[in-house]
Image (cartoon, rainbow, N blue to C red):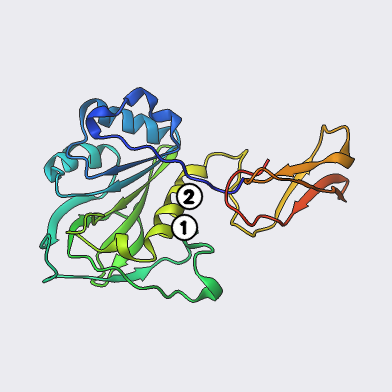
Amino acid sequence: QISRIKTEFFTPEKIEFGTLSQYQVVILSNVPRIDGSLLSSIKDYVKSGNGLIVFPGSDIDLRNYNENFLQELSLPSFVETVGEIGTQKFNLSIGKVDFSHPIFSGVFEDKKYQFESPLFFFLTRIKVEPEHEIILKYSNDEPLLVESNFGEGKIFMFTSSLDPGWSDLYLKGIFVPLVNRCVAYLGTRNHSKERDYYVQEEVSALISGVKNYSDLKIKTPDGNFLKVIPKVDQGNLKIVFNETNNSGIYT
């Protein structure tokens, strides 16, 4: 299948903890406190192999995060805040980028890693341990995006917010592919029966259990049916399909 992300939004007080397992990725953005039932549910959710993305914000209780959520999920702890919300007196850009990380695969053409960097006016400084992988750094070498493992799952932790008073990240071209790739990476890592492809990427699959091999068709996201002819590959029947011009589900 070619990745299509469906989103649902809940305020913290309306989260139904028992239903988290139906989502492949949960994003916590500016949630004031993570403790009690929410903390327990998030721990079980990530430990079982799901993905979590964490954004700070102006409403969060840094001490509560350090003493509960961050400690319980083995995430970097908050040290202090840097900058001033709502002004541009202090600002940082993106510095070092780990382009070898899977979330950047296929994002840049011809290995030309050039993009207009967002500016960050306010951020949370964190204490990173050896088990934490830094994916993005600010221009002052502080961590911007960190990856961490917990149980069978993975967590991405950002150290600045999407709030306009914290940064202009949401206005820059890197924002959409960055968030989409983070979600795709975290959401598909434990789903071995499915695979995400890029638009216009060749798709191949082995087939079996089909009686009439002369009448195989692929249904495209726009509802059309395209005939495909299987080939013999090392004794197996294989379908190769190149007409993946649209994002969505191919059947």
Q: Residue at x 39, y 66 (%)?
A: 173
Give the Cα separation between the discs numbered 1 and 2: 6 Å
Residue 169 left/right relative to 3: left
Q: Nearer the viewer, residue 155 or 20?
A: 20
Residue 249 left/right relative to 8: right
Q: Considering the image in quadrants, where does the C terminus appear? A: top right
Q: Residue at x 70, y 56 (%)?
A: 243
Q: Quadrant of residue 29?
A: top left
Query: Of the residues shown, which amino acid type is indicated by label 1?
Result: Ile
Give SS at disc 2: helix
Q: Nearer the viewer, residue 74 or 116?
A: 116
Give SS at disc 1: helix
- Placement of 149 over or under 95, stated as above or below: above
Neighbour class for label 1 at 10 Å: few (<14), some, many (≥20)? Answer: many
Q: Residue at x 23, y 38 (%)?
A: 69
Q: Residue at x 25, y 55 (%)?
A: 159
Q: Nearer the viewer, residue 168 or 98?
A: 168
The label number, if any, that marks residue 103 in the structure image: 1
Residue named by callout 2: 185
Residue that lies at the very extreme toward the top in this rendered image: 18
- Placement of 35 over or under 66, stated as above or below: above
- Placement of 129 over or under 107, stated as above or below: above
Nearer-N-terminus badge (1/2)? 1
* Residue 187 percent location from the top left of the image: 47, 43
Neighbour class for label 2 at 10 Å: few (<14), some, many (≥20)? Answer: some
* Residue 23 percent location from the top left of the image: 43, 34
Query: Of the residues shown, which amino acid type is indicated by label 2?
Result: Tyr
Q: Quadrant of residue 177?
A: bottom left
Q: Are marks 1 and 2 in contact (CB under 8 Å)?
A: yes
* Residue 211 percent location from the top left of the image: 88, 32
Residue 17 left/right relative to 100: left
